[in-house]
Amino acid sequence: MKINSYLLVLLIPLFSSAQISTEKSTVFNNLNAKTEQNYTTQTIQLTLKTAFQITQQARTAATALGKNVSIAILDGSGQIIIITRDEEVGPHNTEAARRKAYTALSTKTPTLLLSKNARLNPDTQNLATLPELLLLAGGYPLWYNGKIIGGIGVAGGGSPENDDLIAKSGAIIDAQITTH
């Protein structure tokens, strides 16, 4: 009986340490799972094919207005996917289109609306001083299922209203890619 008691006394710490080790392992694994979720996200990316389609739709709207324009499509992180320029458009319009797309993407606001709001509100007038932002009409954020996935910018349409209308026409409703 004494031997069994000694064995029991010796084995109790072994069993309890195994249980603690299992509990620590479970806690550690749960912590890792929670941490992993906090450090990564899934994103939806515009494809080159989609950028071409958006560009073509905007170019069709420009042609209907009799306008030659530059069009820029940016992905959700502000990187250029495609920039096109009609032959008769001034070279400054290419950079203007990119910056309009970037401004719309960055602020999640159409640039015509942003420009109007900035002029009316002293607190937002300084937005015009940020180097990458361009508060001129012709930029729209591109949305998919409530998430921003890119931006479109149009320049050279002859008026703020034309640039705005042409950029807005880049939406692909069938694919649930909207500009509002």
Image (cartoon, rainbow, N blue to C red):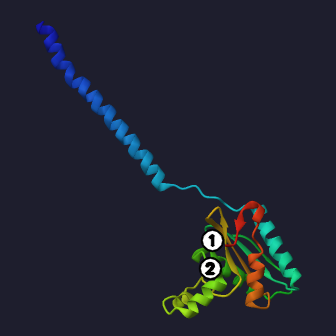
**165 with respect to 128 (left or right):** right
Please, is residue 152 above or below residue 43 in the view? Answer: below
Query: Residue under circle 1?
Result: 78
Q: Which image quarter holds the C terminus? A: bottom right
Residue 59 showing in the rendered view: yes
* Residue 155 shows up from this direction: no
Q: Residues within 10 Å of mark 2 (few under 14, many from 20)?
A: many
Q: Which residue is painted at 84% across and 81% down in the image?
A: 62
Tag 2: residue type? Thr
- Does 65 sit left or right of 11 as displayed? right
Q: Quadrant of residue 105?
A: bottom right
Q: CA distance from mark 2 to mark 1?
A: 9 Å
**Residue at 55% from the left image edge and 90% from the top image edge:** 129
The x and y percentages for residue 3 are 14, 8
Residue placed at 79% from the left, 87% from the top? 157
Residue located farthest toward the top when viewing the structure as drawn: 1
Q: Quadrant of the N terminus?
A: top left
Q: Amino acid at mark 1?
A: Gly
Q: Quadrant of residue 21?
A: top left
| Disc with the residue nearer the chain's start (2 vs 1) | 1
Residue picked out by circle 2: 103
Which of 138/91 is in front? 138
Examine the image and state in which quarter residue 133 appears.
bottom right
Q: Which mark's residue is nearer the viewer, 2 or 1? A: 2
What residue is drawn where x is 29% and y is 29%?
19
How far across and how far down the image is residue 145, in percent?
A: 64, 61
